[in-house]
Amino acid sequence: MKPWILSFHDGAAAASDRVGGPAARVAAGLPTPLGFRVESEAAASWLRDERWPDAVKDALAAAVAKMAAQTQGPLVLWVRAADVGPGAPEPLEGVGLHPGVLPALEASLGEIAAKSLWVSFLRAWGEGVIGIHATRFQRLDGVRAEASDGAALSVVATGLIDLIHSCRGSVPGDVLGQVTLAIESVWRAHGSARAKYQRRVHGVAETDGPAVEVMVLPLDGSNETRGTGTVWSRDPTTGAAGLRGSWREGGWTVADSGSVGTLPDAVVHALAPYVAGCEKLLRDGVAIRYLMSGARVWVLDARPMPRATLAAIQVAVDLANEGVIDRSEALMRVDPASLESLLRPTIAPGAIRRSIAKGLGASQGAATGRVCFTADECLAMREQREPAILVRVDASAEDIVGLGVAAGILTTRGGQTSHVAIAAREKGLPAVVSCSEITVDYTRSLLYAGDNIVGRGDWISLDGSTGDVLLGRAELVEPPGAGDALRVLLGWADSVARVAVRANADAAADAARARSFGAVGIGLCRTERMFYEPDALRALRRAILAEDGRARARALADALPLMREQFRALFSQMAGFPVTIRLLDPPLHEFLPRRPEDVASVALELGLRTETLAARVEQLAEVNPMLGLRGVRVGITRPEIYRAQVRAIFEAACQLTAEGVAVAPEILVPLVSAERELRHIRAIIVEVAEQVVAEHNVPVTYQVGTMIELPRAALLADRLAGSADFFSFGTNDLTQMVWGLSREDQGRFIPLYLAAGVLEGSPVARFDVDGVGALVRIAVEKGRAAKPRLGLGACGEHAGDPSGIAFFHDVGLDHVSCSPFRVPVARLAAAQVALGRRAAKAP
Amino acid sequence: MKPWILSFHDGAAAASDRVGGPAARVAAGLPTPLGFRVESEAAASWLRDERWPDAVKDALAAAVAKMAAQTQGPLVLWVRAADVGPGAPEPLEGVGLHPGVLPALEASLGEIAAKSLWVSFLRAWGEGVIGIHATRFQRLDGVRAEASDGAALSVVATGLIDLIHSCRGSVPGDVLGQVTLAIESVWRAHGSARAKYQRRVHGVAETDGPAVEVMVLPLDGSNETRGTGTVWSRDPTTGAAGLRGSWREGGWTVADSGSVGTLPDAVVHALAPYVAGCEKLLRDGVAIRYLMSGARVWVLDARPMPRATLAAIQVAVDLANEGVIDRSEALMRVDPASLESLLRPTIAPGAIRRSIAKGLGASQGAATGRVCFTADECLAMREQREPAILVRVDASAEDIVGLGVAAGILTTRGGQTSHVAIAAREKGLPAVVSCSEITVDYTRSLLYAGDNIVGRGDWISLDGSTGDVLLGRAELVEPPGAGDALRVLLGWADSVARVAVRANADAAADAARARSFGAVGIGLCRTERMFYEPDALRALRRAILAEDGRARARALADALPLMREQFRALFSQMAGFPVTIRLLDPPLHEFLPRRPEDVASVALELGLRTETLAARVEQLAEVNPMLGLRGVRVGITRPEIYRAQVRAIFEAACQLTAEGVAVAPEILVPLVSAERELRHIRAIIVEVAEQVVAEHNVPVTYQVGTMIELPRAALLADRLAGSADFFSFGTNDLTQMVWGLSREDQGRFIPLYLAAGVLEGSPVARFDVDGVGALVRIAVEKGRAAKPRLGLGACGEHAGDPSGIAFFHDVGLDHVSCSPFRVPVARLAAAQVALGRRAAKAP
């Protein structure tokens, strides 16, 4: 049996130590304090048998005794898990302290510093080792914060000892006794349900047990020359080359790494020679926590640099260019999800956050503006050149118009995949949704959040990442922008990824953004968005209310030039790239006004009696709109609408082709459940397309495909493939049908499910590989079997999510399509999954 | 090449003729007029080449010439398809008539009879041969109906000839020309899209083309002794043994078989000797159409008896007992769907039907009663001992109470699988739903149907089979009742069926009915129905509105004795048989009032402020209730509700077990989509069950199972099987999810789909084997693979539908469960599919 306890300075330890661990650092020449490691086998044994093997216990006693012999003054230790991953407990500082050694420590550090360390130790012992809940320390924490002399600190220490005793805990009077309990607490924490849960959530593999490090805290210097800090091998914010560091004079605790400042020369001299070697050792930028004591500099900890996204990218690209790592590794180093924050403004890190409510962060980035309750108010606010935050219970077609002129949006209902959330993400507009802590009173133009009352025109701020709603005008930081390093990295990504990344874009501005983020096409243009434009909306409303097909066609003719111009602009932006255009999808009643005041004004606009319009609205209302007259059902029952859309698409395509612009439209039919639906609509599309092409006498190549968003479409994909050139998986709707769960209504029970541990996440937010994935797999297999060259893409919200992309890669899709701001995320994620799968296959 | 034209009296013809065809009848000795058959090969050739082969044309001319030579007087013929199946045209009578032969015919038959035949021929020629649409004959049909003398009939004949000419048609002046065109019209009709559609709908296999029969109409007798009619070998209504017949003196047309009356002795003497042989030949009761001409009786047609259901059953059982057919064949002879009508009253056949609107017939049988618009009005009507018809736009929990005291129900919305339709079917209550031609004005207590205005208390009648709404008090006929023959037949059915038939029953009365119809258990008890009872509803409402779990539990405790009594009654009725009880399924807001006036009265009842209740109702409202907080989601978020239900079930089970009654509860968890949901609820069920069992100290054996009604449950059935003793397929919801189609909203587009030929039937009404079936198959395979002894049943509406039962048999389910009135249908259907599959397997 190999020894389960190894000294850092034992040659044998270096081999068994993890890269960058203390023994390895010793081997690399870094000044490391005395210490030893308890191997994970000991943890496994203890967790299994609930007792220490005798031999290990003896070895521990010997190791502690040896350290004591080699140390001058009181033995003060640091005990922690060797790997600080999800679920690992905080390090314990000051192990070994007890009333008997305090006088000696006071003599060495001074009374205040020594007693502070003692109090700090007792506090950590009580919570970490004895397991007392944090809330029970509240009173003493308050006293401690105010304590300014030794006497006050002594009172706190006594209070902490009393609390520990009252909870049937104790603080052993000997070093070995404390070390033993401290090590056990690390092991116990590792085996807890909470830690297991956290590891599962973060995707960290389970191990038998954690190795534990026990290290001397060198506390023997004078006050003047003592301090702690961190040295970074590169700038932790930007990743720029060159040493950075922090320094806290007189600091005695290592928990705080501080922020970038000026380093004492002694530290630079002591550590600079080792930094490059340390980077090679860790194959990454490094953060070295040090403690300066007298003239000596000790390295407490050397780890890969935790750093801001921008820095992560810069470091990864630089290291690859410097040959320290290869490009594949550089690609694996950056968290795709972190890229999105680079492109949006955020609330300044130091800003005062007067949070008044918390909802779901539905679209990243931050916004500040003045409260508006209607789209009209937003427009008026824009006239005054003031930013507006649109606040609504939930958002309808009327409100979507407001999105174009608001700086941010806040709703009290709806979920992260509600229409408004999706629209906000695509516009790059910060949004907080499902904020049930806020009540909106439209009549009085007020919102209530707890005791706060906010009126129209008052300033609020939204943090679309955390879901926080802040009172007042928060300070924002502009986005750092993509930068050259990101461009380089994503270029590498594209060369290894197998899944192409397109963008969801409904208008030319979105398409331009998509291109600038590197999208290689539009995977989803939702044509309904074109009808949010007032003139087009009026035409569509007249068509919806028309008595017969001819009147409907007449009404739509008014919207034709407008639609054609929108398609022209979209095609122009995406010249040379495919553009997938989905025909009208939402239920028709979504385009009609719902609120009585809107009904009245729309009726006036359309020249109808209010009662007539109200009756038609009532008639078109549905019990379950999600399962009603929408998608291809609109196309089959009101063919004039699809005909008008197809005509506009092909008129635009013909015009541009004649002008020499390369156009590749792909017409997408939504909500298909039966082969004959698709055949029926395909015939209409082909008829209109050929008619327009003949009128213009210009050839246009196009494809016709179907959404796979109903279980039946997936189950019978082989039949649909007969009438489809491509499939586009709509995982939003597919998820709703597979789970029988509406994205609008899931908020009622999913939080309770998460609380009860029945689910680990909402399937709406996280792609359900087991259920929805099984259907996608069936559809891909059946579709490709029937038509090997069938195009396959995904355009749901999950298509921009790294775990979704991994699945779509595995199942063999050609492309994913996500909101423009997610395109860089998806490109990197697509590369990572390709690399990961290649590595898994390698022998 | 075998001859394509064969005389009935040619010996070779009998071999090629179908059983019961004219040549076979000649061979059996029945007096058959001269005639010949044009074989189907000729049709196939003509349909392919659009011309007659020369040899066949010559043979036709020869056959006609030969008949003419053998016939005295004018040659008058009958031309028709040999097999009268779906899509076949009406027979053409009078072929060969033209102005040149009329005088001779008048001399033989008299002026009126001859001219009537001439007019009748021209009318049939115009529509059947020339293809003039029926509507264009309207005016002349009117004149003809009034015509009482020869002159008037001549006017009609001239009008018909003019109409035919104006449509570029003609009536050839020679027999051969007419026969040729008449035969072609039969062929053309067979090849039409309409006929193909009808054959597909009726499941009749496609053939190359129809054989055609051409036969002489013997019209040579005197007026006194001439007549036509039908002889039935058994009573066509009851199936009782013994000859029955009809006789129409002076009749000259054979299209009308007349009704049972007294037969002339001559007919009895002429045909009686042949009847038993004819039954053996056809292996069924027979209907022989005859024509008596002078002293001679001619058989025009001999076919299996078309007969009422009761007769069909009696004849099938008698023939099997007489050894003419075996029991399997007797079982195959009766249409399962026809059994349902035996158990419900119907509108008397001769009753005057003043139809004012047509909806969907949602529950068979007929009802007559006085219009009521609320449940309270129904109650008041019952006090007056008058039957009530409840009329609603759609039905809510409030209205369901009314179902118990109404004689029938009429709604203007909702579909055939709406809650009210299902409830009505299970109560055996006639219902017409989705009757959009009717507008209900609650304020004035009036309903409008076209020009008709019907007020509260006025009499209307409903035909739940056809969907007709009739003004006034229609005469009803009581149901004939099951009868001994049906009992015998269903006994035979049970001995061959592999799928057992249970019933859906929510209360003891339904269970009693289910047992009387032979259900071997309850496959679905919907516990929500128990809460339609006012006291229980009040308790549930208090629980829904409770602030926390304890208040919720307290509120439900009030309903416990009531629930326990209901379960006791149910278990007692089903002693010795399994009872599957589904825990609460609907969204909670379904139990709260919706209409403002109801909110006010319920608030008063619960001691709440109206605004408070209105706010809570608003809060619980959902955008897509079908996809919201219901089923197991209620159980997980409000466990007190399921706990109370499970306690009531087991208290009842323990009490009865102690009394010596055999009880076998099966607890069914609805709307499960993830394994952990089921495990979570199963743990609660087991905990409460064991607690109650311990309190009573009586052992109760029970099972816990899950509904498979969401696609995800089907896709991951292997995992669910781990926590389930049985699965119950809920094909209603599964269909809605697979198609993304709400049963409430599908009425908006499905009719247009059917009209456009995009679908052949609503998937809600007809089991979708391809899509929904694929998921069921996956679930069965995965479930059984994980747990071979897993119980499998189906309880959706399709479970009572013969095509659904065939699928469930094929896929290997243990039982189906349907409404009590459908149990006989399902038992017979289950036997038929078992026999059909056995026959298909036999060599």
Image (cartoon, coloured by chain):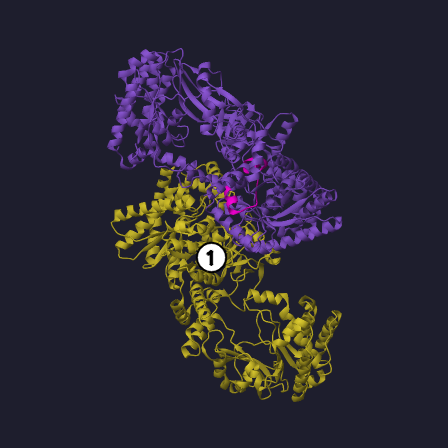
Chain colours: A purple, B yellow
* Image location of residue B797, percent across then percent down: 47, 57
Q: Of A583 and A831, which appears nearest the observer? A: A831
Q: Is residue A142 left or right of residue B759?
A: left
Q: Position of residue B256 (x, y in %)?
A: 58, 76
Across and down, in percent, residue A493 comes to 55, 37
Instruction: Assign the C terminus of chain B to one quadrant of the image.
Output: bottom left
Highlighted range, magenta = A806-826
Image quarter of the N terminus of chain B = bottom right
In magenta segment, residue A476: no
Q: Amino acid at mark 1?
A: Glu
Q: Which residue is mark 1?
A: B797
* Secondary structure beneath label 1: helix
Q: Position of residue B92 (x, y in %)?
A: 64, 76
Report the residue at 60% width, 88% height from top. Answer: B294
Please state which of residues B382 and B633 is positioned toward the viewer in this rendering: B633
Is the residue B173 above or below the residue A701 in the image? below
Q: Is residue B607 left or right of residue B760?
A: left
